[in-house]
Image (cartoon, rainbow, N blue to C red):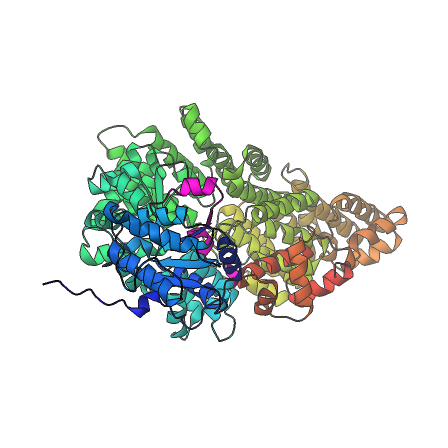
Amino acid sequence: MAVPEDPLLAAKLAVPVQAPGLVRRERLLDRLTAGTAGPLTLITGAAGAGKTALAASWALSRPESAPLVWVTVEEDDTPASFWAYVAEGLRRRGLPSGTGPGTPVPADAAARSQLVRLAAAFERLPDPLVMVVDGLDRVPGREVHDGLRFVTEHAGPALRLVLISREDPGLPLHRYRAEGRLQEIREADLAFTRHEAALLLGGPGPAPDDEVVDLLLGRTEGWAAGLRLCALAMARTADPAGFARSFTASEQAVSDYLLTEVLAAQPTPARELLLRTGVLDLVHADLAAALTGRADAERTLQELVRCHAFVEPLAGTRWYRFHPLFAEVLRAHLRSLRPELEPRLHRRAARWYADGGRPAEAVDQAAAGGDWDFAAAQTVRHLMVAPLLAVPGATPSADTFTDMPADLPGAAPALVAAACRLSHHDAAGCGTRLAWAERRMHDADRPPEPADQLTAVLLRLLSAPDGQGDAEARRAAALMAHLTPEERAGHPEIEPLRLYGHALARRRAGALRAARDGLEQAVAACSGDPTALLRHRSLGRLALADAAAGALAWAQEHGTASLAVADRYGLPDAQRSGAADLALAAVAVERGDLGTAAAHLDGCEPFPDTSRDADLATERLVLRSRLAVARGRWQEALDVLDEPAPPASPDAVARLAVAHASAALAHGDPGTALVVLAELPEGPPACTVVLAEAHLAAGRPDQALRLVARAEDAEEATDADRVRLELLRAHHALLAGDESAARDRLAQAVDRALPELLRRPFTEAGPWVRHLARDLNGHADAYVRLTGAPARSEALVVEQLSPREKEVLRQVARMMSTEEVAAELRLSVNTVKTHLRGIYRKLCVSRRRDAVERARELHIL
């Protein structure tokens, strides 16, 4: 008895209904229209890429009179049922099909005449007909593909075929391309643009924040279903921005879809490969074989690429990458199924990378697998502690070792822990862990490796207490001499790091001139992108050394250059140094430009080393105190110096004492100044100068004069010190009744201060200076030029505003908020904040209103 044939389902011949909130994508609709002017259009992409939605949107927008047949293929369709649906679709459009209604049209060789009749029917069509075949990848075997190839090549010009598939069909596409008969819309074309993503995420409601769009677009890489699922999930939350910032939330939104539509659709070997290799961001074919134990791993990866299973080859290599959301879903699924397997896979990958000479990746994988001994050993052996400290975005970074236990045996983990502490400006913590490492190296059965020794010496140099810098620098140089040319070329940051550390050690020991020379050498040794962070930091510290020496023009130049390097390389706040801003603030204080000084002191607040590094934290307190003195806020100047600061070197303690004594003197309290300075051991010339000022203010001119003579003989005395010494002698002569000698000394002080516009010594000296300056003969103009308050419009603009900064400033001048500026210019809020910070720095202001006023004074607005 014959089995009756199944009826044909109308739903398989209907154009799919469009989902609510569909975004019309005109750029792709136009391409589809252009494609259907030719014989074949192919739309391919991953599950959820928007293939069917695009074609359906286009089909439904066509006039009813334009002939179109839509056939949806399903997994259980046979070649016979497929051709039956094609014939039925033609019949329902009132077009000849060459067969009877509902009659199967087999595609085997014995029934080739049926396909001939079908092709002939297409050939006789009076008008062009579009036939859309959706889900062609679902039909098994090659018979349907072979039949389509035959019909396409013999149907004549009236048939316009649109094929929708997750993989390339078995047609001679290369020939069709060469003949110009093929229009293709592929996965990259289907990816949503930023504008389309904003429309999809916004839906019928208000437009989403730019940051939300940017985050979700970057995370989904424009994948249509991912964006749609994230939009639905985000609509159910009270915090859309928080949802967008959470990678986990995005992963959960798409997890079921990817597991069902992508992972479950693969054969067992491919599923196992995806789960095992999904623990990596990138996978090499050989690494995939190592993780799966399968010799056919590369062929499986190629098949996954072919069927658009969210695996993408890196052009010209044997490397592959996973879509980031798919990778996260794979990892979560693996943890759920076999939680013990993931760390083993990471450890196996670490050995593969190490054997292949890729230590940075080996460290990352070892850390991900919890193999901290191996991760630390690779970091030290391959001299990666230096880039960890000095190269922006280096791998590994201190964050790589966040979860490393503190009690691991061996020297390498202790050395890495010390470096991580130092990267967070914790010199004391670095020293403690470095001592552990050195004890472990000493107690080991064999001599330490050269890399271990060099790493330890560099860390000791960078965190060395006073007096050890020279010895450590020599040891580092001697160990570096044993590096191979390849190691030197691979680590251009080591030599400037050694010079930088040596200079800091000299600075902590109070050897200012030697420290400045060392910083100049460090700057000169920095070359190329890998040393950008070191160049930024070295220039900033050099600017501070210049400012301390009274070389204000050099301080201005070097500080500005340091900020320019940070901006050019986009260094994040967590890695930037506050040294340059502090140096520029010091210049502004010395020259009496108090607004600029305040702006730079505010500008360095976000940078961690400003508060964590003992030298910089001390400098910040000193400058805040000086600024308060200059503004006449005596108590504030004293209170600032009572704020807690990191443990400081003797030199830093001396600077704080000098600032304290200067604030007390400005308040008319020489007794407090003398008490503060009496507690110091022999200090730098600046201590002697302020001590002499305190004795003179306390009515002890002879004692003051003896201190002046001692300071004048000090080789380390700066220009600012010597200006103050001239002023002390002038004041002493005035008190002794020798006004002529006092005026001569004042003239010499003016001559010495004028080249660098050192104004502060005169403003802090007291009213006697103004009285004496009334008759300076040939120096009167110079005195006025030196001590007159600078006009606001003459304040230095550090650097010209960029075109984008000017755009931001124009919106700010319209009283727009940061969020409104971001929306107007289609930027993220964080980007606008970065531009505002650059504007404040370049205009030497600290507030929006001041920036607008300053820009108008300079005719920028």
In the image, is 778 to the left or to the right of 461? Answer: right
Residue 189 highlighted magenta (yes or no): yes
Q: What residue sits 71% from the left and 48% below the top? A: 724
User: Which image quadrant: the N terminus?
Assistant: bottom left
Find the magenta span and give its range.
170-195
**761, above or below 706, in the image:** below
Q: Is residue 487 visible?
A: yes
Q: Is residue 251 visible?
A: no
**407, above or below 483, in the image:** below
Residue 794 highlighted magenta (yes or no): no
Q: 521 or 28: nearer the eye?
A: 28
User: Which image quadrant: the C terminus?
Assistant: bottom right
> Could you tell me residue 112's position as x and y percent?
28, 47
Q: What residue sits 26% from the left and 61% below the top? A: 103
> Could you tell me residue 108's position as x and y percent?
24, 48
In the image, is 193 to the left or to the right of 258? Answer: right
